[in-house]
Image (tube, helix red, strand yellow):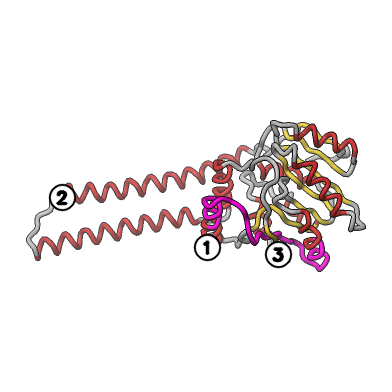
Amino acid sequence: MYSFVIPAFNEEKNVVLIYQRLLDIMKKHEKGFEIIFVDDGSRDNTKETLVKLANEDKRLKVISLSRNFGHQSALTAGLKYAKGDAIISMDCDLQDPPEVIDQMIEKWKEGFDIVYARRKTRHDNFIKKHTALLYYKLLDRFSDTKIPRNVGDFRLIDKKVHKELILLNEKAIYMRGLVAWMGYKHTFVDFDRPERIHGKTGYSWEKMIRLAMDGMLNFSLMPLKFGFVIGSFSIVMGFLFLVYMFFDSIINHSIYELIKWLVVVMFIFVGFIFILLWILGEYIGRIYNESKGRPTYLVDEKFNFDENINA
């Protein structure tokens, strides 16, 4: 049994295309399958299109969330309902090409518990491409968990990995980090990422920054170390100022007003304090969100699911 988990936000033109391409792919495989679409509060006709498809094919299942909770929350919702021996998560925009799935399944049959689809090339604009490159370099350098580069949420996981994954109860979800943190035997399948066919990405700059922060703060203490580096630099620079002032006064008989040095040093330390306050606020905010215990999503409707299944 294969399970496909596909979050969708304003993808009314793409859901039919990816559904048809998955059907073509799965004709080659003897095992059964289910396709779980999670409508993440779409404002177009994505939900209506999915319900129509679900009425025609019971293998297609639909979870409709009560509002837009974000890609990672929608992905979590779909994973909790999946019941396959192998679970494949992917985006709905066809930039995760279904044709790669055959290679992923072959790797799984070879005994790998996690199969990552890794992008060799991508057609993003200059800014997005290079900020993503810088982000993953920083994350790889400072994170305690080695998260694979150029890997999104297009992956296959075995049911034993899935069983443990859905037990995790984090509120600030960074799924690619959680899967990497779990370990297990894994491998990669490389692919060239195509351009989006219809619509535009649901990841605004705000959402991408929020996702990047989830990855950085959930799996790295780098921000705290960053504050330590700035503090150390401030102390060393202040010490050098004092040394320079001392020798310049003795050798060149220069006279410095104390207020000038105090203004410079205070300016440096005020910036240092503001950075530390920002970092402290981020961590406290995450502790606060975790302590509230709110669910990461709410289901409005389900289609083609057994009534006794809950998530």
Start and end of the magenta stretch?
Answer: 105-133
Q: SS for tag 2?
A: helix
**Which residue position is annotated with label 2?**
258
Mark drawn on residue 188: 3
Q: Where does the N terminus fall, quadrant-wise?
A: bottom right
In the picture of the structure, the residue carrying the numbered disc 1 is 141
Q: How many marks?
A: 3
**Residue density around tag 1, few if under 14, some if 14–19, many if 20 or more, within 10 Å:** few
Q: Is the Cβ of the residue at disc 1 closer than 8 Å to that at disc 2?
A: no
Instruction: Say whether disc 3 or disc 2 marks the residue closer to the N-terminus.
Output: 3
Looking at the image, residue 19 lies above or below residue 249:
above
Mark nearest the camera among 3 and 2 is 3
Sooner in the amino-acid sequence: mark 1 or mark 2: 1
- Closer to the camera, 199 or 28? 199
Q: Secondary structure at mark 3?
A: strand
Instruction: From the viewer's side, name the closer residue of 225 and 63.
Output: 63
Report x, y in % for residue 170: 65, 47
Label 1, label 2: how far apart the Cα atoms are: 41 Å
